[in-house]
Amino acid sequence: MKNRHTTKVMLLLVLLSFGTLIHLSWNNKEEGPDTDWFPFVPENTPDSGVIGMKSWLDAPAGKYGFVQMEKEQLVFENGKPIKFWGTNLNGSNAFPSREDAAKFTDFLSKYGVNAVRFHKFTWNATDPMHSTIPHPKKFERLDYFHARLKEAGIYYGWSAIYGHRVLPGDSSGLLAYQEVKNLTYPWSHLNGSTSSLVNFAPDLQALSIALTVNMLNRTNPHTGLRYADDPALAFVEFQNEDNIFWSAIERSLEQAPTYRALLCRQFSQWLLAKYGSLEQLENAWGPGTIPASESLDSGNIYPQPNHAIFSREYEAALANGQPLPVHLLDKMRFLYEQQVAYYRKFEQAVRETGYKGVIVGSCWQAGSGSSHLYNLHADYLVGMIDRHNYFGGGAGGHQLATGAVKSASMLKNPGSGLLSTGLQQVVDRPFSFSEWMSLVPNQWTAEAAPLLAIYGMGLQGWDASFSFAVDIPRFSPFLESAHHGVYNATSPLHLGLYPALARMVYRGDVRESPVLGSRKVHLPSLETELPAFVERVAQGHDDKGFSGSLSPSSLAVGKIPLEFTALPERRQLPDLSPFLDSLSRSLISVTGELSWNVDRGYFSVNTPGSKGLVGFLPDSARTLGRWTVQSPNEFAVILLTSLQAGKSLDQADSLLLTTVARARNTGMVYSDSGDELEAIGTSPLLLEPVDLNLGLPVGEHFDLCILDHDGRVTDARFAVTEGRLELRGSQTKSLYYLLLRR
């Protein structure tokens, strides 16, 4: 809470007349997690309670036909639009027992998840000798799970291949089986796989294609449908986090000389077809550009498939006001064409099975500037644009550990972090964010899901979101995931917000921005010149930041996507200065529903269906339509939303009030600055209470019910008759409240 103070003991509810100024009294006692923070102790019951969303899922999945692309939207075959607010299930979680399949389905249904991205689940689920043949017994579990999800109205997508691991039965069809089998990477889970090399090697491509085709041709005995004929299969992704520009390919090529020779031969043939002779090539590239050990005659000219090289040279060209060297332009174009050829081959094979759903090429980055745009266009050609990003974390990397904390908040820098991923949205393609999470021990992780639901899925019109990840069919008893480290979707600061956020997404509470302008890309021009605008991608490992000619803060105002054009076009980007309210220091969305305070670091949402504040809250009350909201918390998420599908806050009989702030393990200790984690702590998980003053619409009367941590009504029910209520989270020990209109 603000100034690390805590309130004096107050009555559970103070009923005051509307308009009365409320003065909160504070003492000087130092706040600590063990004073008024309370344990989060859900029973994890499948009972719907007040918050449950099973009835919001339009079961069974697939009833309106396949999910398809219609320009920038996802729609069913009957034309009905759809947005997916989903999550990831990984590895062995794709093959649960029937009991656990039922638990996962009930858990996800209750919290409004309408789609699951099944991720990297084929590593240990194929025939022991042949990597392209699904293992019947293991896939029977997947079949049953899919059928349960389908019955509940939950769609599924396949991200099956993340480094296709070769097996002995594959050897006869490969150029150099042992080279691939012996490959090692900095990431051990990719060892012995076709990762990176697959983007140019036809023999390795055949493995990924064959496995995917065999899976699509498999008949699910529990639905009676081949997967290719199952409209609940929303999308098929060719490969996870891979492309021909990925710098890891150079490490692979060092260990796989047969495949390096293949790539060099392909490039040399491409150069010969373009230039016709070594003389013409040298004239174009300039003297001394081709290493002495390489030549067209030998067919061994190396295309340097490494986005770090292309990004470095792009920045140098920008700084010097010079074009990129011709040899780099040729190398990028060649690599792009190789990527497109692979994806087109894969696309044809998938379509020949009869599958009519959405296709995703991949979801990975390729540096800045031209290589980035080439990679994006390769994905664009075959389907939906899909990307990944992460934010926060600390010294432990994938696991929670003491040490340095990445303590920044995305709300302090509008458009930064996760939301900046949306700068890759393209004007006539759906946009999916299929892996994301704000990672602990960052203390502001509760900001992430509202930010993406409201600004991403709402204002920017994204079509699909899949948080990373759910690994158990219940809430984690720790700040971190019980089995999945810092990637914890099963947190009250994340999934606990879904009863409000999923309703907002499905009801379309936040109006989508019109296209205010676009950054135009004429792809053939990249063969000879720099892009007409600056595009930068700063990448750590999984965390990325996007910037350039268009500020990421534009994402707080409206849509300015990329646009691939048939002819060169140069247009100025729109002037967004009218949307900065200099008095309130806020970025106002073009729809007028959202306001992002750039000084304090919070945003407000004010729509007919939902209202709220998210972030580092103002000292004074905020008026949101007929409601006012004020909280003494330094940081909080406060969301008020209609519980009814077709009704606004003014019309609904029942409203859900959701309040969360920070969370810590019992005994968890941060440094005073918050930049160091000194002790991890253990269960139970403790929640910081949110204190709240809510001004109700004039003349309206409500009853207030305090809900338990599973969203069920408790015996605590109070009449609110005078237009304002004051809640003390340290007293209610809840994050959910029900308002019933009388």
Image (cartoon, rainbow, N blue to C red):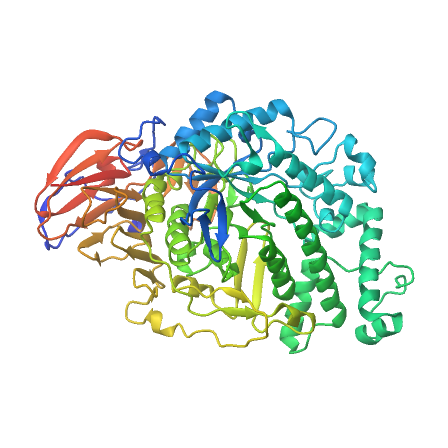
> Percent position (x, y) of residue 610?
27, 50
Task: Confirm whether residue 679 shows in the render.
Answer: no
Quarter occupied by residue 375? bottom right
How many numbered discs, if any?
A: 0
Q: Residue at x 32, y 67 (%)?
A: 585
Q: Which quadrant of the figure contains the C terminus? A: top left
Quarter occupied by residue 704? top left
Task: Confirm whether residue 264 shows in the render.
Answer: yes
> Percent position (x, y) of residue 458?
38, 54
> Percent position (x, y) of residue 374?
64, 62
Q: Residue at x 83, y 35 (%)?
A: 172
Q: Residue furthest right?
A: 297
In front of the other: 663 or 456? 456
Q: Residue furthest bottom?
A: 321
> Percent position (x, y) of residue 455?
39, 56
Q: Up-down: is 143 above or below 243?
A: above
Residue 737 left/right relative to 190:
left
In front of the other: 4 or 342? 342
In front of the other: 96 or 683? 96
Residue 8 left/right relative to 458:
left
